[in-house]
Structure formats: structure tokens, C-alpha cells
Amino acid sequence: MKWFLTVLAQLLFAIFMYLMGSVFFGAALVPGVALFLKVWQATLVTAPILRLFLLGVSLSAGFFIFGLTLILLVGTFRTVLGLRLKEGTYPLSSMQAMKWAFMSSLFLMIHYTFIDFILLTPFANILFRLLGAKLGKNVHFNSKYVFDATLLEIGDNTVIGGGAIINGHIVERGSLRLRKVKIGSNVLLGSHCTIMPGCEIGDRAIIAAGTIVPKGTIVPPRTVYAGREHEHKKDAQEG
């Protein structure tokens, strides 16, 4: 019976998120659809080739308008409701775990539809700030795999390399563990590295490409971290 109730709860949650997704996607599509209909009406007597071109441009523009509108809707929704994750260890059936799943689902709506188009632009910083991250100045995001934004702090002039993964959660032994990730200023996260929950990375540190930084690791300032099998080397430019 317990197994059945768990599966039923998961199904109901999935259906609820589909409905939420429909509402957010529908609302975000309104400006783009309005633009397309406006162009459709305005080009009724236009030459066919030109009309097709203008309609195509309006569809493309509508997609970008959709993406930016979705970011604002999701971010505003999270901000207004004050949704934030709290550090701790929680059963998978707890309210905190449900909140984490809900907030993750909100982010995934953007993750799977539009985030690739805003990497390395100011819109990426706007997105993660709206999702609750504490960011310094001039942070560069070149990865869409930045999760659990309300548990993330990044200092000034830090670069998140392509495909880097930053995670504030992990599931262990049937429990959800949420921990902050703190990244200092002038840090470089190499491409496809992985930063696990609870990590603290000091100013001017470099995380080598492809490196996994285990949960709870503290990387000292001005060091190059290349994994446990490598010695952490002092930055040659220190001082």
C-alpha cells in the first residue's frame, strides 16, 4: 500500500507540473503569437515570397520573445512566492523535497527550451538572479547545468566553463541532501567539471576541465584543483 501511495503521489505531482508547464508556456507564447497574427494580417496583400519571409521572421522573433518572457514569468513567480531551498537532509517524501522538485521543474522548463540561447549573455545572469542565486559582478555562464540556484553564491569575474555542472543537491540512502555551493571571485571552472553540494572554492582558484570536486570540498584560494589523484598546485602567478 505504501508503494502504491508513493507512485500515486508521483503521478499526481507529474500531472500538476504538466498543468503548470502548460500555464507558463501558454502565457509566455502570448506575445509571440500576437506578433505572428499581426504580421499575418498586415501581409495579406504582400507578394507571396515576401510574405513567407516576413511570417518566418515573425515566428523566429516570437520564439526569442517566448524564451525571454518565460524567464521573466518563472523568475517573477519564484520571487513573489519567496521560494528558497534550505540546507539540510530531508526524506524524499518530505515537503522540502517536494519544494526542491517543484523549483527544479520550474528551472527545467527554461533549461530544455531556451537557456542555450542566453549563455554568455547578460540574460543568463538575470535568469540565475531571478532564480535566487547570489551573483557578483561580471559573472560569465557558459553552461546550462547550473542547478539549485537559491543555494549558489558566486563572486565577481568568475567564469563557468562550457558544460560545467554545479549541483546543490544529492540523493543518498533515500534522503535528499541540500548544501550551499560557494564560489569566490576570479574563479575559473573548466569545461565539464562537476561541483558537488557543500563545496567552497576560494578566490582565483582554477578547477581543471573534467574534474569532479566531491561534496564538501574546500578548494583554497589561488590553487589549481585537478582531482584527488593530482596535487593541488599553487597558482604560478600568485603574488
Image (cartoon, rainbow, N blue to C red):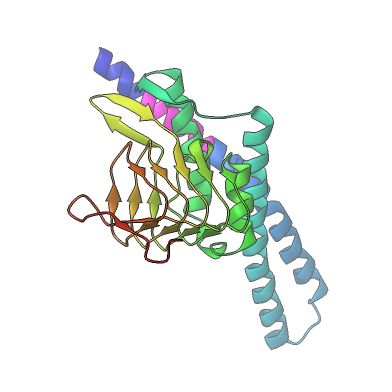
Prevailing SS of the magenta stretch: helix
Horizontal relation, residue 146 to residue 59: left or right: left
Residue 212, position as x, y percentages in the image: 28, 50
Q: Residue furthest left?
A: 229
Residue under the image location 70 percent in, 59 percent down: 33
Q: Which residue lies furthest to the top in this view?
A: 1
In front: 158, or 167? 158
Please say whether residue 53 is one of the residues in the magenta stretch.
Answer: no
In front: 195, or 58? 195
In the rendered image, the vertical position of residue 136 relative to residue 159, given as above or below: above
Q: Which residues are drawn in magenta?
A: 9-19
In the rendered image, the vertical position of residue 234 relative to residue 179, given as above or below: below
**For residue 73, which quarter of the picture?**
top right
Residue 220, position as x, y percentages in the image: 38, 47
Residue under the image location 55 percent in, 64 percent down: 120
In the rendered image, the vertical position of residue 13 relative to residue 185, given as above or below: above
Residue 135, position as x, y percentages in the image: 59, 47
